[in-house]
Image (cartoon, rainbow, N blue to C red):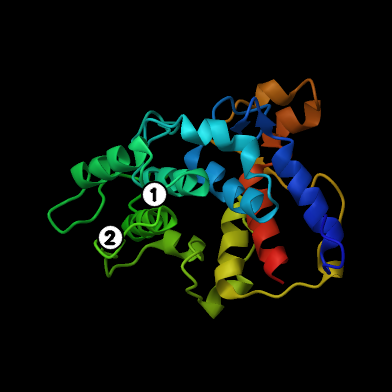
Amino acid sequence: MFDGHPFEKQLNILHEEIVSQIVDGKPLPNKYVYRKPWRRDGAMMAMVLEKTGRIGLIRDWILSLDDPFDRNNKGNEEPDNIGQSLYLLGCVADANHPSVKAFIDVAHEHMDSDGILTGLVDYGRHRVYAQKWLKLGLEKCGLDASWGVIPDEADDYDGIFWMDGSRDPSLASVTLNENYPYLTWAQWHKGGRIFSPNDIPAVSPMTWEAHASEADYEAIRPVDNRWADAKICYPHTWHAAEMFLLLYEL
């Protein structure tokens, strides 16, 4: 599929690791240890599927979205989900889809007096990250995003948001997070890290996640007892998407 690309072998494996985790049209982080899609992971998968012309694989699921939150982290309404849900809708529909207006109304309801989304992302205060996702989602739907104010404050999750074109060279050399490697790949992307094909072994599986609080690792035991014991799953679609999107650009 990626004939002539210097990372042809890696991209083919990563794309397959993403597509293989779509079950009944639903994009799962990993089909064994997760039973529901996550908007964050789903939006990153959608970026890949758009580039490869396979967004239709999750089109029906996207069009069925009627709640901007996935509520997967202990039932929390994570504010970044609003922008991710809008982004997903913008992949297959436009601003006329009824959920677009509904999700924007929810965004306003969850804003403080300064126009900043409230709530926790991954159990932390990541207001810059949530606001940037909101702007990206609005833009994807072809809407004015100027009212999505970006707060001037520190937010370590801003380091994993490279989709606005911002770059921070200091992130190019951060150490790989062995449990959540997608966070590091996003930082490397924002840092402008350069790889050569020999740096990335084209051996499947290439991606994983470990020790995630909401993953059911016992469910992967029939595949590999060692994975279950180590509380790790292979592959992982957010990881695959972040790797794909960086290597594809290179």
Q: Which mark is residue 217?
A: none
Q: Nearer the viewer, residue 218 or 244?
A: 244
Q: Quadrant location of the C terminus?
A: bottom right
Who's the residue at 31% across and 61% down the image? 145
Displayed quadrant of residue 66: top left
State how far apart marks 1 and 2 are (Cα): 10 Å
- Graded by Cα atoms within 10 Å as few (under 14), some (14 to 19) or many (20 or more), the crowding at tag 1 reads many
Element under disc 2: loop
Residue 28, position in %: x, y? 61, 34
Who's the residue at 62% across and 52% down the image? 50
Number of residue marks = 2
Q: Residue furthest left?
A: 113
Query: What kind of residue is marked 2?
Result: Gly
Q: Which residue is mark 2?
A: 148
Query: What kind of residue is marked 1?
Result: Gly
Q: Quadrant location of the N terminus?
A: bottom right
Q: Which residue is mark 1?
A: 83
Who's the residue at 27% across and 65% down the image? 146
Residue 230, position in %: x, y? 71, 34
Answer whether residue 219 is visible to the viewer in this image.
yes
